[in-house]
Amino acid sequence: MQGRSCFTRQFRKRNHMKLQQLRYIWEISRNELNVSATADSLYTSQPGISKQVRQLEQELGISIFSRNGKQLTEITDAGKLIIALAGEILGKTQNIRHIAQEYRDNKIGTLSIATTHTQARYVLPPVIRQFMQRYPAIKLNIHQGSPMQIAEEVSRGVVDMAIATEALDQFNNLVVLPCYEWSRCLLVKPEHPLTQLDEITLNDVASYPIVTYVAGFTGRSRIDQAFEKHHLHPQSALSAVDADVIKTYVRLGMGVGIVAQMAYDPVADGDLVALDASHLFGESITKIGLRRDLFFREFIFEFIRLFAPELTPEKIKQAISFREMPEINPVED
Amino acid sequence: MQGRSCFTRQFRKRNHMKLQQLRYIWEISRNELNVSATADSLYTSQPGISKQVRQLEQELGISIFSRNGKQLTEITDAGKLIIALAGEILGKTQNIRHIAQEYRDNKIGTLSIATTHTQARYVLPPVIRQFMQRYPAIKLNIHQGSPMQIAEEVSRGVVDMAIATEALDQFNNLVVLPCYEWSRCLLVKPEHPLTQLDEITLNDVASYPIVTYVAGFTGRSRIDQAFEKHHLHPQSALSAVDADVIKTYVRLGMGVGIVAQMAYDPVADGDLVALDASHLFGESITKIGLRRDLFFREFIFEFIRLFAPELTPEKIKQAISFREMPEINPVED
DNA sequence: GTTCATTACGGATTCCGTAAGGATG
DNA sequence: CATCCTTACGGAATCCGTAATGAAC
């Protein structure tokens, strides 16, 4: 079909798989099979990518992508497996570069962290201040996103580590390190009736409209579980992605805020009252997620230690070498 | 030190890590740092390899090998880590090729097995006959070697699977699948006094010189353990690597042979008498070892099933996903 | 008609072999 | 002096960009 070149040069094309070819198919799959977009994101030309992909397919003797005419429509079964392997290979080449950098000078490099608003805004600043002081030549990248986004980013190797309370457990190529426990507090205006109670119950809270995180953020699931368990269905006045928005609406009198305890700042939030709610919603655990096959540079250990002092390099190494037994669901039913 | 090129062309050499460079450093480390030998084994020129290695080192900004003058003397710390990663990467590129071949035609390909004399000579032939019948277009390679050699071969990816009773557990990148239990028998000439006893004890055996496997082969350790436990120290007339040699010397009257039960062939060995010794030395287990990150082509599952019918693909997959908790030694002391 | 992948082609780069050079033991 | 790595150099292959072609929506 492809012209009559079937009988010419059939003999052996000294074609050796190249890392760039793997990079290309990996990136194409990340760009929804749009080769042009991929070319842009890699700062190269699109025919170049096209060519290398076909070359790889020819060398392997199979199609990685299904095509409708010239459009790439989907990834073949073999392609899925191959692209997954390509991702692992590219991750390892990154590790080789990291190793080299570590041995050249373990004080320079880049640390990319993906995290949520709560961590970035309230928890990380002192840690980062200390870290920058100790490693002034390490460039820091903070990516903010939803728990799901940041879990994906660390899983794909876009960033070195993710810090979040949710979603990290769902990726089985990640090591998940529990860092610290936290609970929630209620935010209300000083004149709110709840401030008069000695012992607040879930019933009390549920009698007001509540203002808290949207699903999937900062332990929202815990809040739902607690109400669910007592068959309460409080009215939700507003759901927000971050505590700053929640506070704003509490100040407007829209309801009772439920936020992570870290998010209450006695100084900046002096106009609001924080009421402990640890007995209402229990504890949540913030975790660090890292690719299991990441090369751990010294400063990564150090950053983790600053963030969670009990996590020594030894404990981390131990956590990596253990593979969580197939799918341990914390709440099984 | 290396000339004064420090200030020329410092700026940016558009150098991208290449798979061949990784192949080269990996192979050099396999060839005791002899670049010339590596070049021969790869059918290429030695300056070409040298060049690529230096190019890689320059790109990474570190030395992978330490040099005394021009000789490569050892692998640097960073080099060790990098070469290990290179090995994993190369393994994964092999997997990509295997996947492609599987999807192109799952009836063609190559299966390389490393195994010991005992398996190759007495156990594998019927399995291989069946396999060749079912997959006539799969090319089979059988590498014979010592348990340690074959364990290394499969660990490095030189072969697809290893079959042995010993040594496989020592490599933590292997999945080890127990296949079948076997015990030993005593081989003597018909006129030997042992043939007159109803119940043979270790004491009886130890009163004659024994002829059996050398250390590290075919469960020799089990034999030593059994004698040790009873504080017996039989005289060893001869130690051999395989049962055929043992039989030869039993025929010469040099002593009592102790061989794996599979090694006794009632027809070919009709001039000798086999006496069951399972109560003396206990059982051993023959295992298959495969790299944990191997891509399992259909015919590999099939071969394993022919060899050990209980090992279904499901069980194998399960065994892979489990990581044996750090070093489970079957016989700990 | 717009978007997008493929083919064609040409300049620059890279690869890889041979030959010569220098260091080590 | 034998071994072995490095440098030098030249032909061949490859890469990668621009431009033109063609298919799909």
Image (cartoon, coloured by chain):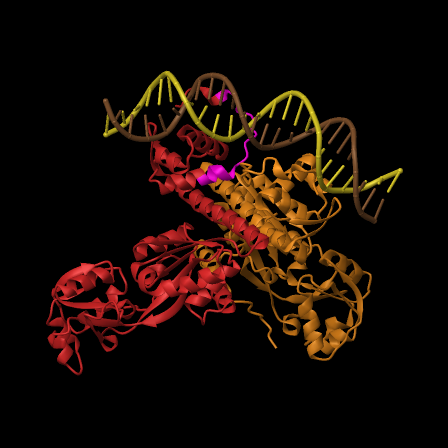
Chain colours: A orange, B red, C yellow, D brown
Image quarter in which the C terminus of chain B is found: bottom left
**Residue B171: percent from the left, percent from the top?**
38, 57
Kindly tell me whether residue B38 is visible in this rendering.
Answer: yes
**Residue B286: percent from the left, percent from the top?**
35, 66
Could you say which quadrant of the image residue A328 lies in? bottom right
Kindly tell me whether residue A322 is visible in this rendering.
Answer: no
Foreground residue among A315 and B74: B74
User: As displayed, is residue B203 above or below residue A286?
Assistant: below
Which residue is drawn at the image coordinates 52% and 68% (left, top)? B314
Could you say which quadrant of the image residue A163 lies in? bottom right
Image quarter in which the N terminus of chain B is found: top left
**Residue A204: percent from the left, percent from the top?**
74, 76
Magenta segment's dominant SS is: loop
Which residue is drawn at the image coordinates 31% and 54% (left, top)? B145
Residue interval drawn in magenta: B7-23
In the picture, measured across the screen, residue B178 lies left or right of residue A8, that is left
Residue A7 falls inside the magenta stretch? no
Foreground residue among A326 and A124: A326
**Residue B309: percent from the left, percent from the top?**
44, 71
Residue B15 falls inside the magenta stretch? yes
In the picture, measured across the screen, residue A187 lies left or right of residue A291, that is right
In the picture, measured across the screen, residue B315 lies left or right of residue A218, that is left
In the picture, measured across the screen, residue A48 lies left or right of residue A191, that is left
